[in-house]
Amino acid sequence: MSDLAELERLIRADSAERGQAVSKLGYFCAPFRPSAGPLSDKVIKVYRGLRNVAELERLAQCHDDYVAALALTGVDLPETAFHLLQIDGARIPVIVQDALPSDSMMRPQIIAADLDGAVEMMEAAGQVIATFWNNADKVDGRVGFHPSIRNFAYLDGKALFFDTFPPLIHYSRDEMGKMLLTFSDKRLMRWVGPFLQKKVTGIQDEWYSAPETLVGLVGSACRLRPDDSDRFLEWGQDFARRAMPRWAEEAIPEMKAPPKLPAYWTGFRKVLGLQGEPNV
């Protein structure tokens, strides 16, 4: 049986045969890792199917281009492949990615580490952010990056980014805003989102801003470990000066106090049950 045939079989299978979900609270899907078989060393991410063939083919091309853009800017990814599978009358986007060790997710490690260890992980993640933005000029067109703590693993002293959906390349701001609704795994979001399209569209703005991605990383750490916020803020300001000087003037004032999520996004997260678990 080919890997694609096995992939289709697993998508049709029940949850017991699929294996344990490795993340329950992602915005777009709940990735899973098969418990046995030829894909047991992979994480599988299944997204909502669409009948618009042109839209899906564009998505596939943008995903390939985004993986290439991450490589061009120096961001390492686990081996990642995008497929469009024909299932029950719709084409289903599926991402298959080399699995990472379950204990390598950065978020729980930052929570459990001593303070010096947590700052070392922040430094590792920060270096990935700086590498991307310091090289983003090599990429043609609009390109973004979503380096939240939950989108990193931490292995052998290095941060490894693994989130490629939605592919933050080529799409305009308005198009990306609509994608956030189209591919949401939450039916409630698809129902109420169109009435709040302007606010939903704004969710992405941080991902396309070099200083805001760094500020967002620091804000996440402060929310995870509020008692250690001063240390994370100190680290963030220092990191901006030495690793991202082009954006330091803009980033540093946002790290004088613990950065907060926009109120509307906090509300969305509570309603949708999203609590920042690793989005592997």
Image (cartoon, rainbow, N blue to C red):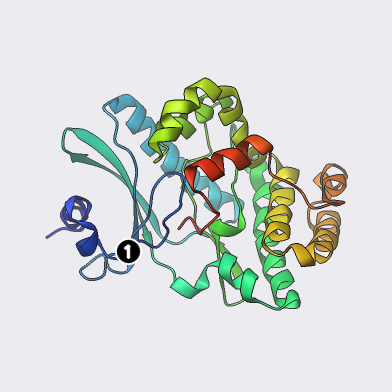
- Across and down, in percent, residue 227 comes to 78, 66
Q: Quadrant of the C terminus?
A: bottom left
Amino acid at pointer 1:
Arg
Q: Which image quarter: residue 247?
A: top right
User: Which residue shows up at 41% across the image and 60% down it?
Assistant: 79
Residue 101 can be seen, yes or no: no
- Across and down, in percent, residue 80 comes to 40, 55
Q: Quadrant of the N terminus?
A: bottom left
Residue 200 can be seen, yes or no: yes
User: Which residue shows up at 63% across the image and 70% down it?
Assistant: 111
Say whether residue 17 is left or right of residue 123: left
Say whether residue 70 is left or right of residue 4: right
Residue at image mark 1: 33
User: Which residue shows up at 67% across the image and 55% down it?
Assistant: 220
Q: Nearer the viewer, residue 100 or 264?
A: 264
- Across and down, in percent, residue 88 comes to 16, 37
Say whether residue 186 is left or right of residue 227: left
Q: Element under label 1?
A: loop
Above or below, comparing residue 248 to residue 109 in the picture: above
Above or below, comparing residue 235 to residue 48 in the picture: below
Q: Nearer the viewer, residue 182 or 225?
A: 225
The residue carrying pointer 1 sits among few (fewer than 14), some (14 to 19) or many (20 or more) residues within 10 Å by Cα, namely many
Say whether residue 111 is left or right of residue 228: left
